[in-house]
Amino acid sequence: MAERLTSAESPLVKVIGKPGSALAHALRDFLHRSDIPFESVQVTTDEEARAIAGVAHLHDSRLPVCVFADGTRMECPTLRQILEKLGWFKTPSRSEYDLAIYGAGPAGLSAAVYGASEGLRTVLIERWAVGGQSGSTSSIENYLGFPQGIAGAELAERAREQAEKFGAEILLGREGLRAEFMPGSGVGYLADGTRISARASICATGMEYRRLDLPDEERFRGAGVYYGAGASEAALTRGEPVFIVGGGNSAGQAAMHFSPQASEVTLVIHGSSLKETLSKYLVDRIYAAPNVEVLPCTEVVALEGDEELREITLRDRKSGRERKARTRWLFICIGGVPQTRWAVEVGAVRDDAGYIVTGPDLACVPHDHARRWPLDREPYYLETSLPGVFAAGDVRHGSVKRYASAVGEGAMAVIFVHRYLTGG
């Protein structure tokens, strides 16, 4: 029987796909992160594929199929096709902006709101969906002003609407390839050939999910192996065992989100206790949940399956003993690595871990003479080694990895952008 997952609101999109489809997962993830009501239908037999999806069989290359509320049908669609249908794929309206922001996580969205509201001609570029990694979080409960918590996707959508209300342009589904920064201007080159010219720039590209680096990990990506809190998949785990690797707040929030649906949820952590890495309110809830188990000093060392994940191997880091566990659901929440490859080409100073170094910290990080601060004035607090280029949020050296901190840095970066543009 086909399995259905429907958002609380009337769905705007129906995603019909087979279990273990990486593309169907990517579409669900994008729609969830974008706070778009959708219905997910998983077909499991050839008969269902023909009757529900209108394709020849379960392995038809036209799957997944998206059906929109107006009856429009798309077979195996691209993200750009989805964005165009939703009216969200836009072209730049200006030849030059005052401020270009790269990355629409909390820091980038905050910078867009404050930049546009203060009169800067602002453009925000994002390769995927607004919200960054926090967009996959089911509930952010320790963010100021939301005592009952709020889904990361909903918070990001509110910020997107707010930024656009003030006049910020948001370009989704656009990936940056390279950049050139010169005194008084910078140009970003996007994968589709678009050029973004701006007098100042803010890098808020955040983090890429860290991998386990196991054989077959990429093969099972979206087909049993998922990165981040995975809120879009929770209802599909009904009655099945779920494993989550990681001991931070995102992993803890994911465990509580999955527990009402899954038969059991297992948190796999490297350390000896959750108390070392998790907020107390989450620790208390996890240990009170009857179907949530914590495996300390444990790691996942192998993945097995056919078209999708079927089994994982767990190793006790103290004794070295291994055991296998059956599951189709492995969520990896072990932090990330900064998305700063562009910085190497343009010569922005990074630390040994790849984070962008800014402000006073530039004087403390060894770097060659060619990359020294070129101006007589000192760099502003969030300014990189390239004058007029700023960094905010998780991508920045020394940042505090919290939603509120990223929002604050995005707002603060705009203040320094103003100073840079006015010569203050």
Image (cartoon, rainbow, N blue to C red):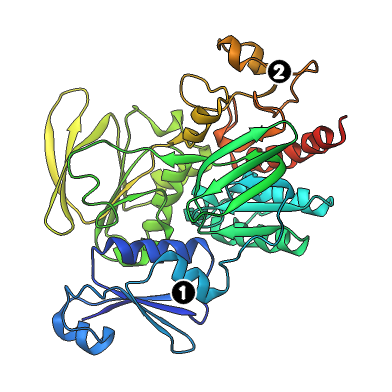
Residue 146 lies in quadrant: bottom right
The image quarter in which residue 93 lies:
bottom right
Quadrant of the image containing the N terminus: bottom left
* Residue drawn at x 52%, y 57% as measured from the top left: 129
Residue 58, position in %: x, y? 17, 76
Q: Are marks 1 and 2 in contact (CB under 8 Å)?
A: no
Using the image as rendered, state which of residue 113 and residue 4 is in the foreground.
113
Tell me which corner region of the image, top left, top right, bottom left or bottom right, holds residue 22: bottom left
Q: Nearer the viewer, residue 49 or 148?
A: 49
Badge 2: few (under 14), some or many (20 or more) residues near its Cα, within 10 Å?
A: few
Q: Which residue does the numbered mark 1 point to in the structure image?
A: 7
Q: What's under tag 2, amino acid-wise?
A: Pro
Q: Label 1 sits on what residue type?
A: Ser
Name the secondary structure under disc 1: loop
Is any part of residue 144 visible from this angle?
no
Residue 396: x and y in percent read: 58, 30
Asked whether the viewer can see residue 324, the reply is yes
Across and down, in percent, residue 118 comes to: 84, 50
- What residue did someone put label 2 on? 374
Q: Nearer the viewer, mark 1 or mark 2?
A: 2
Q: Provide residue 218's location: percent of width, then percent of height.
A: 25, 47
Q: What is the CA distance from the residue labelled 1 to the residue labelled 2?
A: 53 Å
- Asked if residue 217 is positioned above or below residue 223 in the image, the reply reads above
Left/right placement of residue 399 relative to residue 37 reads right
Counting residues from the N terminus, which is met first, the one under dot 1 or under dot 2?
1
Q: Residue at x 45, y 28 (%)?
A: 276
**Quick one: quadrant of the C terminus?**
top right
| Category of crowding for the residue at label 1, using alpha-carbon neighbours closer than 10 angstroms: few (below 14), some (14–19), many (at least 20) | some
141 and 328: which is toward the camera: 328
